[in-house]
Amino acid sequence: MEYIGDAKYVLLGEASHGTHEYYVWRAKITQRLIQEKGFSFVAVEGDWPDCYRLNRYAKGHLDSGTDIYSILNEFNRWPTWMWANWEIAAFIDWLKNFNENLSADNRVGFYGLDVYSFGESMQAIIHYLEKNDPVALKAAKKAMTCFENFGKDEGQTYARASAFVPELCEKEVLHLLTEIRNNIATYNSDAENVFSTEQNAYIARNAEKYYRAMIKNGPGSWNIRDQHMVATLERLMKFHGKVAKTIVWEHNTHIGDARATSMASQGMINVGQLLREQYQIDGVVTVGFGSYKGSVVAGRSWGEAMRKITVPEAEEGSWEHSFHIAAKGENRLLLMNKLNREKYFDLPIGHRAIGVVYNPEHERFGNYVPSIMPKRYDAFIFIDETNALHPIHIQTDEKEIPETYPFGM
């Protein structure tokens, strides 16, 4: 807490999307930041429409649902376990209870930063405009119809078609965003719902850009995604006012400065880099996470059923292996400005990164990102052995609560 000081941006990472300890430690750190330092909202590597429902629930609104299990059980886009898990349920319920003692304008929010939710965002726009703006509704339906001509396969068909017809539905989504922005002052509903509608239109525009970039080799689609997440964060900071402060939950590959990794040589940028470049004067603190061994929830291939997978001992010579040896199997909080800056710490050394697809038998070929650790993060939390998180959708009885719930929150 002392190290974070008055920073407005605290970025909390994870070395996988399916580890219990990463979620719980981020939640506990976040609770203290909210209680002790007055942070305004949490922004995560998740879809805006789904996370917005969690936000409304946490703020005591009845328009999203009356219990956390029912809301999370409707998270249907793969990988469902990233946010539909009991660790998130515990945190959101804690946040709801915390917010009950605050005025409506001061309640702490929970938002998704990602660009992937084109279909869900368009449905949310149409649902809102049906009640508030019949003119913009026509533009929304026209944009939706344009995309429906290319199927419902997460933009794959659209991406392939864009190689032959560069514009496709670009004009339609830009027209939709323009219509909403022109008329937004006339919308008389809840200010946050108005903001959400405009945000969904931004998602539609940037998802279209993302789909077109997917077909090309190179870092284009990755960079569009991370630029979108930073732009969303900027919009949220503006919405919350001059004293706003945010906590970001994303994978290490997004929050750890790309310039200190092999990503830079591939032309890739990320959220951590962009925030440091643009907002270091406001205070940006990045905290990475990692472990030596354990278990994780992931799929063997994209879209495949989630499963619990053993995470083997880290490769010899990796950062995780070095921390395991140095800490003698114990957990450690490492502050980069206090590390003994021997030459070793300025070398690009492999740092394990596990995604939603994970095949441990092949991890030495694709799961270690060469990283200069003191330049990538401001702090690093090393947990020697970690465990798989608790997805809501794969309990023996889906509504059966894990024994240790709510995990000390």
Image (cartoon, rainbow, N blue to C red):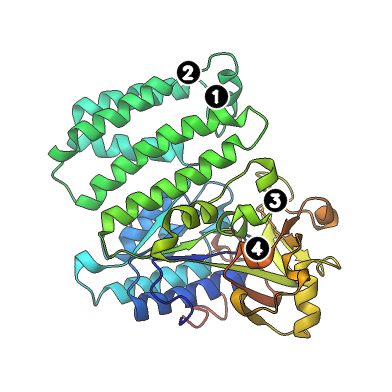
Label 3 vs 4, first from the N-terminus: 4
Q: Which residue is mark 1?
A: 158
SS state under label 1: helix
Separation of marks 3 and 1 at Cα, in angstroms: 23 Å
Q: Position of residue 195 (x, y in %)?
A: 27, 47
Residue at 39% x, 56% y: name it.
111
Residue 25 numbered mark, or none: none
Residue 168 numbered mark, or none: 2
What kind of residue is marked 1? Tyr
Separation of marks 2 and 3 at Cα, in angstroms: 31 Å
SS state under label 3: loop
Using the image as rendered, state which of residue 68 and residue 125 is in the foreground: 125
Discs 3, 4 touching: Cβ within 8 Å: no
Give the quarter of the image for residue 35.
bottom left
Label 2 vs 3, first from the N-terminus: 2
Residue 401 shows in this picture: no
Separation of marks 3 and 4 at Cα, in angstroms: 13 Å
Q: Residues within 10 Å of mark 1 (few under 14, many from 20)?
A: many
Q: Position of residue 68 (x, y in %)?
A: 40, 65
Label 1 vs 4, first from the N-terminus: 4
SS state under label 4: loop
Separation of marks 1 and 2 at Cα, in angstroms: 8 Å
Q: Residues within 10 Å of mark 3 (few under 14, many from 20)?
A: some
Residue 357 numbered mark, or none: 3
Discs 2, 4 touching: Cβ within 8 Å: no
Residue at 45% x, 61% y: name it.
280
Using the image as rendered, state which of residue 39 and residue 161 is in the foreground: 39
Discs 1, 2 touching: Cβ within 8 Å: yes
Label 1 vs 2, first from the N-terminus: 1
Using the image as rendered, state which of residue 397 and residue 257 is in the foreground: 257
Q: Which residue is mark 4?
A: 15
Separation of marks 1 and 4 at Cα, in angstroms: 31 Å
